Structure formats: structure tokens, C-alpha cells
Image (cartoon, rainbow, N blue to C red):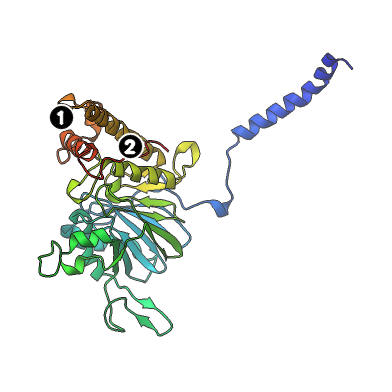
Amino acid sequence: MTYREKLGSARPRLVAGMVAAALLILSPFQPPASAQREPHPSADNPPVVLPNNPVQALFVQGSGKAKVYMLVGAGPGNITLQVGDEGALLVDTGTLAMADQTIAAVKHLMAGLTDQPIRWIVNTHFHPANTGGNAAVSKAGEQLVENSIGTIPLFGKQNEVQPATVVAQENVLKRMSAPTGSQAPTPVDAWPLMTFFTPKKKVVFNDEPIEIIHVPAAHTDGDSLVFFRHSDVVSTGGAFVMTSYPVLDLKTGGTINGNIDALNLIIDLAVPHDHQEGGTYVIPGEGRLCDQADVVDYRNMVVIMRDRIQDMIKRGMTLEQVKAARPTADYDGRYATREWTADMFVEAAYRTLTPTAAGRGRTSQSFK
């Protein structure tokens, strides 16, 4: 048989195979029901309306017994709430002024899902906008630990009801407390009484593994990300905000390279779904709900700003000259705010990148 004859006899099978492949590509893939999470925010899953309360909620997603919500309106920052059979866990507590409304919103969301109280509070950093409600919210909850002897509180006497436990990286406690004999900036009952100094702390609550990951020298020196592994949600605190340039608190160890490192870690933790959308959801410290693509865009912007400012420093430009050059001009319309202006961001980044800023001029990986 000649080559042409062989090609002719094979053509019908080739065409049939191409048609079958095209149909397979065009057919929508439906994962098995066991692999499908609860619906993420969409037109079919609108925000939860909490009557007569400025604090509102959005169901993000959940898995098994756990449901994760994003609460907004308790101050400038977002609150993350995980609810399940064992009770509730909050990431940050909003401002002191909004504590009562925060508690009312949490209890409204818990109703029908659990008869257990608030058990845990995780602080992502020490700022009052995130920890102001600690005392009131923890007192609205109850932390008990069960062992072979019975029910014993973490602190206090046996059978004595204790407030929900507040957890944070140890630098948060250092910022909120003070040495003996000095006046602390916050009351004792707002302090995190369980702290960690290791790179991460792991807990299991509502049958869900949760990682509290320290991201040093980002927004402050005590920032943490909270990763709900089954629900596939990351709560970032001040390490990632959608409403402004990164807010670098220089007095408490914030740096631009540390912030980039934190953003890279969020990107590494997140796994996108269809067309790089959905999948892992990211609850920022401020602003709307995000996914990995949003964090990538934001990280790229921060890296561009860092590299521009760093290049000007290498050319010997002073801070005033860098400000006058307006390295952020093409992003100011999106990220400059009255509270955190472009000049404030440029100055903070400049000071953490100059060689005289000991320990702050290290090089971060730009892209991963």
C-alpha cells in the first residue's frame, strides 16, 4: 500500500478523533458532588442582611461543619468568622466603639448553626482597629478545655467560666502591654493571653485545620495570616489591603520587602479555580473579597513601586527628590488615600530601603 493510500484509509479515524476531542473540550466539566464546596459569593449567594446593624456579613465558603464569613462595618478593617458545631472563631474584633454590633452580628450568624459560644479570637496585629473589640467579644464567649479530669479553663479556677481565648504572635502582646510599673496602652482583658513565637501555630477547630502564620516585618512586626485549610480561605489582616498602598508602620517594624514576602506567601497558599478565578478566597484587612489573581495584581504593583524607589536610591536621590519624581503617579488614582497618601507611602518605602535602615534593606524575591 502506498503512503497516499495509507493516509486516505486513516483519514476517517483521524477526523472522528478530532471531533471527539473537540466535544470533550467544549463539554462543561462537573466534579463529583463529594468534591464540591458550598457556594462562594455570587448572585445566587447574596450578602447576609443583619437587621438594624451596620455590621454586615458575606458567606465566603465552607467545608464540612465549618462555614466562613467576612464581616464588614465594624471599623475600617474586615473581620473573619468561622462557625461550626464547636462554636465560633473570629479573626480580629474591629473597633471598641463597634463591639456591641459585632457581637450581635456574630450571634445572629451563629443561630441555627451551633449552640456553643465564641471560643477563639485570633489577632492579626495589634492596631486598635483590629483589637479594639477584644475585651467585649471575648467576654461574650467562653473558653473551656476538656481533659480526663473534666472541664477546666485555660486560666482561672476549675469550673470557672473564662472569656474566649485571644491568640496572637508574641509581638502583638508586647505592643498591647507594658513592663511592670508602666501604663499599658490597652486594658489587660484585651490582651492576647495565648501567644506564639514560632513561624506558625496550628489548631483544629470545628474539624478544620487552621494555620496562624507569622509574616515578620510586613505591616508590623507581629502580623499573622490565618489559613482555613478545609474551607480554603486566607484571612490576611494588615499584610494585604485592597483600599490603599501597603501601610508600613515603621515604628513597629513594618517594611516594604517584608510586605512583599507576605504577599508572595498568600499567593503560594492560594490555588485558583477556573480561568484563574475563585478557588482559594482571600479576605483582606480592608476592602472587598479577593482571590489569587487580585493578590498577584496587588503584589506586582508593590514590586514595581519598590523597584522604582530602590533605583532612585541607588542613583543617590534624596527623599525629597524621590517624592518630587512621583514614582507612584500611575497608581495614585487607585491606591492613594487621604489617610495614607502617596507621599506617606513613598517615604515609608524609602526609609526601609535605604542602607542606613539596619536590617530593613534586604532583598525580597519579587516574583514566585
- Mark 2 and mark 1 lie on one chain; the one further toward the N terminus is 2
Residue linked to disc 2: 298
Q: Quadrant of residue 263?
A: top left
Identified at 35% across, 65% down, the residue is 88
Q: Callout 2: helix, strand or loop?
A: helix
| Residue 318, disc | 1
The residue positioned farthest toward the right in the image shown? 1
Give the class, few, some or many, for how many residues have Cα within 10 Å of label 1's Cα (few <14, many ≥20): few
**Quadrant of image for the N terminus:** top right
Whether 28 is drawn above or below 326: the answer is below
- The quadrant in which the C terminus is found is top left
- Identify the residue at horizontal 38%, vertical 56% (top origin): 68
Which residue is depicted at the point 58% across and 41% down?
Answer: 29
Q: Which quarter of the picture shows residue 163?
A: bottom left
Residue drawn at (22%, 65%), measured in percent from left and top?
A: 191
Q: Which of 297 and 359 lies nearest the eye of the viewer?
A: 359
Cα separation, mark 2 vs mark 1, equals 27 Å
